[in-house]
Image (tube, helix red, strand yellow):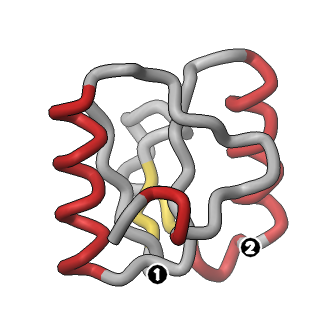
Amino acid sequence: MPMETIPQRAQSTIPTTNRHLIRWVEMLADLCRPSAIHWVDGSHVDQAAWRKEVTDHEELFLPLHDHLPPEMIYERELLICRL
């Protein structure tokens, strides 16, 4: 499934030119059929958008443990692959 056919979140662009990584993501998209792919860039804007999504959908996100940072959560419906 070419990346162009997969919906991406509004401000998500592919932050790499590594063709092997892009091909790997395409292969996973073929297997998993995601409704969208979001490339995390680590910017403050990206982090703020993530926190807003978590607070907007609290029923999908559960904290793992009290002693862990609040960013470490269990997400019920989304597959997140961080490299």
Q: Residue at the spot x=69%, y=45% of the render?
A: 50
Q: Is residue 13 left or right of residue 22?
A: right
Q: Are marks 1 and 2 in contact (CB under 8 Å)?
A: no
- Judging by the rendered image, the residue that carries numbered circle 2 is 57
Q: Is residue 65 left or right of residue 19?
A: right
**Distance from label 1 to label 2 (Cα)?**
11 Å
- Observer-side mark, 1 or 2, equals 1
In front of the other: 75 or 66: 75
Vertical comparison of 2 with 20: above or below: below
Residue at (30% x, 49% y) in the render: 81
Query: Which residue is located at x 28 percent, y 58 percent?
Result: 26
Considering the numbered disc 2 on the image, is that residue within a helix, a strand or a loop? loop
Image location of residue 29, percent across then percent down: 30, 69
> In the depicted view, which residue is nearer to us: 1 or 79?
1
Q: In the rendered picture of this protein, how many numbered marks are placed on residues?
A: 2
Tag shown at residue 20? none
Dot 1: what SS? loop
Q: Amino acid at mark 1?
A: Glu
Q: Where's residue 66, x and y in %?
A: 44, 45
Residue under numbered circle 1 = 77
Quadrant of the drawing holding the C terminus: top left
Question: What amino acid does circle 2 point to?
Answer: His
Q: Is residue 60 left or right of residue 28?
A: right
Q: Earlier in the sequence, mark 1 or mark 2?
A: 2
Image location of residue 24, percent across then percent down: 17, 48
Identify the residue shown where x is 56% and y is 24%. Answer: 41
At label 1, counting other C-alpha atoms closer than 10 Å, the crowd grade (few under 14, some 14-19, many 20 or more) is few
Q: Quadrant of the N terminus?
A: bottom left
